[in-house]
Image (cartoon, helix red, strand yellow):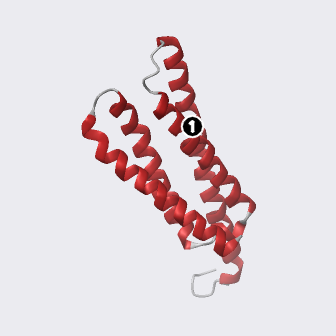
Amino acid sequence: MTTATMDHSETYLPRTRARRISIARVFVRFAVLYALIGMGMGIYMGVAEDFTLRPAHAHINLLGWASTMLFALTYRAVPAMSESRLAIWHLAITTFGIVGMTIAMPLYFYGQEWVHPIIGIAMLAQVIGMSLFTLIVYRHF
C-alpha cells in the first residue's frame, strides 16, 4: 500500500500507543539507572566512611529514582497524559535537570565550586519539569 492510498486510521492508534509507552519506558529506564547510581554512592560512602556525598546521594535517590519512577507509572496508568505534546518537554527538561544534578552535585561537594551555576540551572530545570507535569496532570488526569 502506498502512502497516498494508506488508510491513516489504521496507523494512528499504534503510533499514539508507541509514543505513550515510549515516554513511560524512557522514564523507567532512567529511574533504574538513577537507583543504581544512588545505591553505588551509598555503598561507596559506607565503605569509605566518607559521607561528603550524602546530599547528592539523597537528591539522586529522591529526584532520580523515586520521582522519575512515579512519572513513569503515572504516564503508563493515564494514557491521555502521554499524548500531550508537553509530555515530551517534561521528559526532556526533567532528564536534563536530573543528569545535570547527578554530575554536578558530587563535584561540588568535593570542592569544585565552579559547578555551582550548573547545579542552579539543573534545579531550575527540575522546577520547570515539575511545573509541566503539574500542568499535564491538571489537563489530562
Q: Residues within 10 Å of mark 1 (few under 14, many from 20)?
A: many
Closer to us: 66 or 99: 66
Residue in view at x 36 percent, y 38 percent: 104
The quarter of the picture where residue 111 lies is top left
Residue in view at x 55 percent, y 43 percent: 64
* Residue that protrudes farthest toward the bottom in the picture: 4
The image quadrant where one finds the C terminus is bottom right
* Residue that protrudes farthest toward the right in the picture: 77
Kind of residue indicated by mark 1: Asn
The image quadrant where one finds the N terminus is bottom right
**Helix or strand or loop: what does disc 1 sit on?**
helix
Q: Position of residue 8 (x, y in %)?
A: 65, 82
Q: Position of residue 72 (x, y in %)?
A: 65, 53
The quarter of the picture where residue 138 lies is bottom right
Would residue 99 be visible to someone looking at this image?
A: yes
Residue in view at x 36 percent, y 45 percent: 119
24 on left or right of 105: right
Would residue 15 be visible to someone looking at this image?
A: no
Which residue lies under the disc numbered 1? 61
| Count of numbered tags | 1
Q: Is residue 97 above or below residue 140?
A: above
Closer to us: 95 or 120: 120
59 on left or right of 74: left
Q: Position of residue 102 (x, y in %)?
A: 44, 39
Residue in view at x 63 percent, y 71 percent: 83
Q: Is residue 52 above or below residue 131?
A: above
Q: Is residue 115 above or below residue 95?
A: above
* Residue that protrudes farthest toward the left in the picture: 114
Closer to us: 11 or 90: 90
Q: Position of residue 96 (x, y in %)?
A: 43, 52
